[in-house]
């Protein structure tokens, strides 16, 4: 579910079941034309749905970090730390448009980047996303 799907009452009632926060990273540069921006954001949306749809009762998608730039890795690490300290057990960073490095986004429990997943032709992207998330939950990190 998206963060905006909750009101205070719904979160108080059901919040305990949502242990995983997804933080989208769009990786926009600010130099894209409007049609290019639409294409990139649609790709991000479609990638996020691979985690949101099958795990609707367990994951919450937070607002995206839209733009790349200096300090982005520190910001992503800080966001992961903060959502976990606010009650989420897991923080997953998902990027459909830019590859990120695990050693840089070290506070995330799982980093899913479409460019890397798509380069691995052994399994479909949706199967890979689901198996990575399942492994995270089964292994506790």
Image: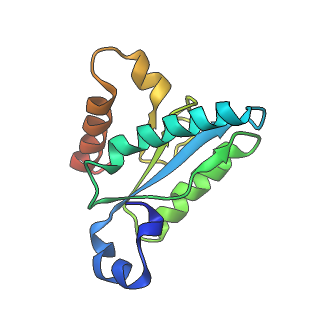
Judge whether 60 appears above or below 6 on screen.
above
Between 64 and 92, the residue placed more toward the observer is: 64
85 lies left or right of 37? left
104 lies left or right of 140? right
The number of numbered badges drawn on the structure is: 0
Q: Quadrant of residue 58?
A: bottom left
Q: Can residue 95 be seen in this view?
A: no
12 lies left or right of 95? left
Q: Which residue is drawn at 30% across and 73% down?
A: 16
Q: Which residue is drawn at 46% across and 65% down?
A: 3
Q: Quadrant of the N terminus?
A: bottom left
Estimate the x, y position of residue 135 in percent, counting from the top left.
25, 41
Q: Is residue 129 visible?
A: yes
Between 1 and 91, the residue placed more toward the observer is: 1
Between 26 and 32, the residue placed more toward the observer is: 32
Estimate the x, y position of residue 137 in percent, counting from the top left.
26, 50
Judge whether 44 appears above or below 1 on screen.
above
């Amino acid at each position: 579910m998206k963060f905006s799907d909750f009101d205070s009452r719904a979160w108080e009632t059901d919040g305990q079941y949502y242990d995983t926060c997804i933080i989208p990273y769009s990786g926009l540069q600010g130099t894209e034309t409007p049609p290019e921006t639409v294409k990139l954001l649609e790709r991000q949306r479609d990638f996020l749905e691979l985690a949101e749809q099958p795990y609707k009762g367990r994951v919450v998608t937070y607002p995206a970090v839209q733009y790349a730039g200096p300090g982005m890795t520190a910001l992503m690490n800080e966001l992961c730390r903060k959502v976990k300290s606010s009650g989420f057990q897991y923080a997953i960073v998902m990027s459909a448009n830019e590859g990120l490095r695990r050693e840089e986004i070290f506070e995330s429990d799982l980093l899913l980047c479409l460019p890397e997943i798509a380069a691995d032709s052994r399994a479909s992207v949706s199967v890979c996303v689901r198996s990575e998330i399942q492994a995270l939950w089964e292994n506790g990190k």
